Image (spheres, rainbow, N blue to C red):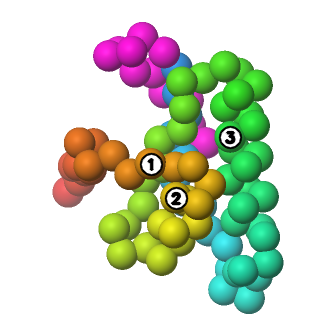
Amino acid sequence: MFHSFSSVSMQPLFILNDLFVNENYRKQGYGVTLLNEAKAVCKKHNYKGLALQTERTNPAQKLYESLGWKQDQDLQYFWTNQ
């Protein structure tokens, strides 16, 4: 998780990237545990929230939504410096 800051809301937030659970350990609760721990850290620091970036085709999106994550269509942009 990376610290960031929203100048719109004037609040700190975390960016969560590169969350990965090995195929051999999926559907055993590890992803749920990792995501819930990330939320707990966010609450502990009283941050605005967590930005989770993932591919639109990622099958784990159902997991994210079941844990209260909301898809934000407005912020789905990425610029690559190549």
Q: Identify whether 61 is placed above or below 3.
A: below
Q: Which range of residues does the magenta coloring cover?
A: 1-11
Asked whether 52 falls inside the magenta stretch, the response is: no
Which amino acid lies under the numbered mark 3 shown in the image of this protein?
Lys
Q: Disc 1 and disc 3: Cα gap in Å?
A: 14 Å
Element assignment for label 2? helix
Left or right: residue 70 compared with residue 81: right
Residue linked to disc 2: 65
Q: Identify whether 59 is placed above or below 6.
A: below
Residue linked to disc 1: 70
* Quarter the N terminus occupies: top right
- Decide: marks 2, 3 in contact (CB < 8 A)? no
Q: Earlier in the sequence, mark 2 or mark 3?
A: 3
Q: Identify whether 74 is placed above or below 47.
A: below
- Decide: marks 2, 1 in contact (CB < 8 A)? yes
Residue 82, percent across and down? 20, 57
Find residue 67 and report its image quarter.
Answer: bottom right
